[in-house]
Amino acid sequence: MSADGGKVAPLRPKRPCPECGRPSSRENYPFCSARCKSIDLNRWLSGVYVIAATEEEEDGSAKPDDPQAN
């Protein structure tokens, strides 16, 4: 046996569910249930979560690969 009393360290640290805050389950990690997992997936698919992008500033010069430049 090992010196720590035979306890096995978990592969992942316990974290709260990002939807409701309850402890996450192994089957639905990082969520606590299939319901919270589905809620998050629906938010991604419906466009609620958006990754912000910055618009490039127009300085008046056209790029070489720009079809409008010719």
Image (cartoon, rainbow, N blue to C red):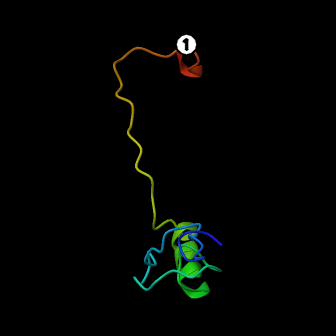
Q: Nearer the viewer, residue 45 or 61?
A: 45
> In the rendering, at what x and y percent does residue 23 appear?
46, 83
Which residue is labeled 1 in the image? Answer: 64
> In the rendering, at what x and y percent does residue 18 appear?
44, 75
Q: Amino acid at mark 1?
A: Pro
| Quadrant occupied by the N terminus | bottom right
> In the rendering, at what x and y percent does residue 20 appear?
42, 84
> In the rendering, at what x and y percent does residue 22 appear?
43, 86
What SS does tag 1 mark?
loop
Number of numbered tags placed on the structure image:
1
Q: Nearer the viewer, residue 57 or 40?
A: 40
**What crowding class fits label 1: few (fewer than 14 Cα within 10 Å), some (14-19), or many (20 or more)?**
few
Q: Residue at x 60, y 76 (%)?
A: 6
In the displayed structure, does residue 62 sit left or right of residue 70? left
Q: Nearer the viewer, residue 46 or 21?
A: 21
In the displayed structure, does residue 17 sit left or right of residue 6? left
Q: Residue at x 53, y 78 (%)?
A: 31
Q: Residue at x 53, y 15 (%)?
A: 69
Q: Is residue 39 above or below residue 55?
A: below
| Quadrant occupied by the C terminus | top right
Q: Quadrant of residue 55?
A: top left
Q: Residue at x 40, y 82 (%)?
A: 21
Q: Quadrant of residue 64?
A: top right
